[in-house]
Image: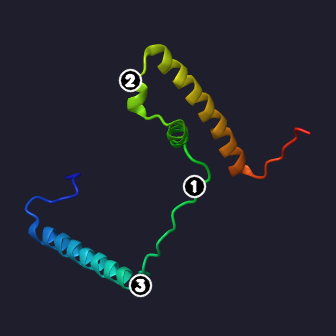
């Protein structure tokens, strides 16, 4: 008595041929569906770029340095103490402008200093 599902001496070529035919039929069906999808595909619309609400801190820092008439080379040429003082003032002004830009981007600004 045999507990196996296959029999010895059974022709395997016919089974392999049937599997190959089914795979080819499936592939042809997939290609036909892809062709149909391409025919019904709408033309892609251009998506407008997202509106920039507030400048980044690095952009604000570059703006502050430009207002002060400095660039990175000028900072490097300064002495240690002068560079430290310049960096501190640039950082303070950058933080101040970043807060103002954030407030402007979030809504109306109310001045409560009366």
Mark toward the start of the polypeptide (2 vs 3): 3
Q: Position of residue 12 (x, y in %)?
A: 11, 65
Estimate how packed mark 1 is, as few (under 14), some (14 to 19) or many (20 or more) residues with alpha carbons within 10 Å.
few
Q: Is residue 49 left or right of residue 77?
A: right
Residue of label 2: 77
Q: Position of residue 23 (x, y in %)?
A: 22, 71
Q: Position of residue 50 (x, y in %)?
A: 55, 60
Which tag is nearer the camera, tag 2 or tag 3?
Answer: 2
- Front residue of this view, candidates 99 and 37: 99
Which tag is nearer the camera, tag 1 or tag 2?
Answer: 2
- Residue occupying image coordinates x 42% and y 21%: 78
Q: CA distance from mark 2 to mark 3?
A: 63 Å
User: Is residue 11 something one can see in this rendering?
Assistant: no
Q: CA distance from mark 1 to mark 2?
A: 34 Å
Quadrant in the rendering for residue 41? bottom left
Query: SS for tag 3?
Result: helix
Q: Are marks 2 and 3 in contact (CB under 8 Å)?
A: no
Estimate how packed mark 2 is, as few (under 14), some (14 to 19) or many (20 or more) residues with alpha carbons within 10 Å.
few
Q: Which mark is residue 40?
A: 3
Residue of label 1: 52
Q: Which mark is residue 21?
A: none
Q: Is residue 43 left or right of residue 111?
A: left
- Residue occupying image coordinates x 49% and y 14%: 81
- Front residue of this view, candidates 54 and 32: 54
- Residue occupying image coordinates x 18% and y 59%: 6
């Amino acid at each position: 008595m045999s507990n196996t599902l296959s029999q010895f001496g059974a022709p395997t070529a016919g089974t392999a041929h049937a599997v190959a035919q089914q795979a080819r039929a499936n592939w042809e069906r997939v290609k036909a569906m892809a062709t149909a999808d391409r025919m019904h595909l709408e033309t892609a619309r251009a998506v407008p770029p997202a509106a920039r609400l507030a400048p980044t801190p690095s952009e604000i820092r570059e703006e502050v340095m430009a207002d002060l008439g400095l660039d990175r080379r000028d900072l490097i040429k300064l002495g240690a103490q002068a560079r430290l003082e310049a960096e501190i003032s640039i950082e303070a002004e950058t933080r101040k402008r970043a807060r103002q830009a954030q407030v402007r981007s979030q809504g109306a600004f109310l001045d409560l200093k009366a």
